[in-house]
Amino acid sequence: MYRKIALYMGLFTALYLIFRFLLPLVIPFVVAAVVAILYYPFIRKIFQKCSLWEHNTGQKKRLLAIAVVVFYAVILIVCMGLIGYLCVEAKNILLNYPFYEAKALCLMRKCCCQLDTWFQMRSGVCFAYLENWMTIMKESVAGRSAGIGIVSQMTLFSVQTVERFFGFLFAFIVTIIATFFLILDYEQIRERLLQNDIGRNICNIVTSCKHTLKTYIKAQGRIMLLDGIVCTIAFCLIGQPYYVFLGPLTAVVDALPILGAGIILIPYVLYLIFTGSFGKAVIIGIAYVCCVVIRQITEPKMIGKQIGLRPIYTIMSMYIGFRLFGVAGFLLGPIGVLIVRQVVLLANKE
């Protein structure tokens, strides 16, 4: 019993150290390996149909390089399109900022008046306190900005942006090159791993993680699609002009266990209630309930049953992974649990 507990604790500690310190250093090669494992079967089928797979010719290498570049180009184009769309929506929101600021102040005034009535205070006391607090916060921010200096801030921001851009560009290029060579030598690498017990165990773990990754992406994609459709329809029904933006955004935020769809929908319901739009508040409330039902009931079953983990373990692994590693922990948590389980099974067989 104690030996088993010690084994689990040692494995989880080792995985934590690997994920925390080693993974950030080799992330381009990890991404390249994941892409190669998932992309290799598709490329092989295409090349076999064209009778280019059996011969290690220069033409095959060139076509393989083109296939890898096209894959990453499509991913990059999709990401850039999404970022461009978000920038356009953000620009529209900024252009209408005075209008939203006026509505926000009006809402805060109504809320403060309601609080004055509830607590039997003189009218305007709460809003005066809020205005005073906002003034102090603005002066504090302005003081810190003046102390640092606007030129220094802009210079520091520009340098950091350039460094991050070139760092990302270099890592992106390394990832593309690594993916090409991993796909090119995929069969040879796999054959060498299968020649010994350690390599076979590694292949078993990789196969298990591959199944987990596919299952997780499919499950999260379906859940986010359902949440996005529900929220988009709800925002459209109440006449929200940015429903195309807010619906998918709510679905993405709903994937975060700490935040969830409530971080957007609950404040929006309260806003609609305070502004007297009770019918619209009911619609958004129903959308929130639907998101909770879809996420809390469907997610553990869709993921847990297919990857062989109980729903409670799936939720725990995603939550702990998020707390330790942020958004990436959604995936690292379940994968870490599966790796530990696979290693324990192999140890028990031996």
Image: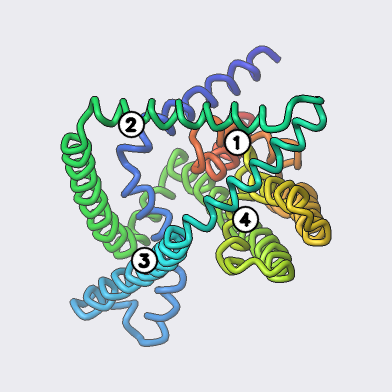
Query: Residue drawn 32% across and 70% down?
Result: 73
Q: Is residue 163 or residue 108 the one in the foreground?
A: 108
The mark found on residue 142 in the picture is 2
What is the spatial separation of the Cα atoms under label 3 and label 4, in whole angstroms? 20 Å
The mark found on residue 250 in the picture is 4
Q: Are marks 3 and 2 in contact (CB under 8 Å)?
A: no
Above or below, 66 relative to 99:
below
Above or below, 74 relative to 328:
below
Q: Position of residue 262 (x, y in %)?
A: 69, 46
Query: Residue drawn 60% across and 23% down?
Result: 8
What is the spatial separation of the Cα atoms under label 4 and label 1, in whole angstroms? 28 Å
The mark found on residue 337 in the picture is 1
Q: Position of residue 152 (x, y in %)?
A: 17, 34
User: Residue 243 lies in what quarter of the image?
Assistant: bottom right
Q: Where is residue 117 in the image (x, y as percent from the top left)?
A: 80, 32
Query: Residue drawn 43% across and 58% down?
Result: 94
Task: Give amino acid for label 2.
Answer: Ala
Dot 3 or dot 4: first in sequence order is 3
